[in-house]
Amino acid sequence: MSAVRYWRDPLWGGVDLMSATFTGDPFGRHLHDTYAIGTVEQGVEEIGFPEGTQGTGVGSIVMIDPGVVHTGRARTPDGWSYRVLYPRPEQVQAIAREAGAGDVVPSFPSRAADDEEACRLLLVAHRAAEQGARLLADSMLRVLLGRLIDRYATGRVRTRRPRAGARAAALARELLHASSADPPDLGTLATAAGSEPFALLRAFRRAYGLPPHAYVLQLRVRRAKSLLAQGVAPAEVAVSVGFCDQSHLSRHFRRAVGVTPGAYQRGVRDGGGLTAGGLS
């Protein structure tokens, strides 16, 4: 039995992603003309490479170069669940250049590595892409690939990373204030600010203490507080400020404010202050 979702995201001019659960031997010998970068969410996958079979489970990041023949099967009857990104060589090359690794097409000879942070980045980015959160997905995917290239790729050459100044960060901030409900992806934001994506990430964090995608969450929570104080229903507020649903709003609102949207709205309406007791 299998459950598969495969789609093409508009990021980077189009990049393919897949989330899937498989049992048995779903993949015979095959290859891709793209990279295959993935991580297992549950179970263990056995991947057959020309040099031998490798088991990958939770906490392992898989990095398969274009043109490498491989197979895929479940190690146990329960199967495995995983998420995969399929960037094209020119896309990875462009990110390597931005990350200061030179104008090379990186190769990942190790195929897989235990790297919990890389797995976390991929899962956050993948889920964000699935939800249409372009700025978060683009930011995390670039950081992920930059990390993999820096740690595991061959052929890289250290070059000076481009820098962005306070002016670029300020321009990006203005754009985010104007589009917080539906911000552009990081590449588009950087171009509009006259910068490169990695350089803008560093400059923005340096100027405002947060990366752009996290800054947008704060703008949304601020706007949500205003609408809740006006009596707008939390579900309507969530959609209005750019969250995908009320639970998404509640999660981020509580992290930032300390109470749920419903509790905040009642406290403002009743004028009795906000407490942690009886949160909805």
Image (cartoon, grey):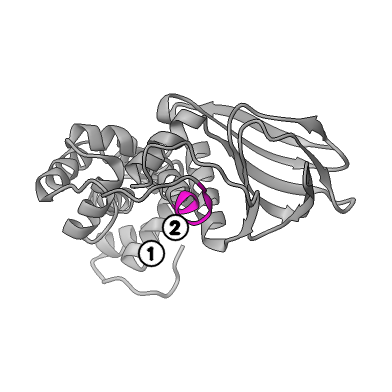
In the picture, the disc for residue 255 is: 1
Q: What amino acid is at disc 1?
A: Arg
User: Which residue shows up at 20% across the image and 59% down it?
Assistant: 206
User: Which residue shows up at 27% across the image and 49% down it?
Assistant: 161
- Specify the farthest residue to the left: 167
User: Which residue shows up at 58% across the image and 28% down it?
Assistant: 7
24 lies above or below 59: above
Q: Secondary structure at mark 2?
A: helix
Marks 2 and 1: in contact by CB < 8 Å? yes
Question: Does residue 64 appear anywhere in the picture?
Answer: yes
Q: Main secondary structure of the magenta part?
A: helix
Q: Is residue 121 left or right of residue 44?
A: left
Question: Does residue 263 appear anywhere in the picture?
Answer: no
Q: Is residue 193 left or right of residue 72?
A: left
Region of the chain picked out in magenta, as a range: 147-154
Residue 151 part of the magenta segment: yes
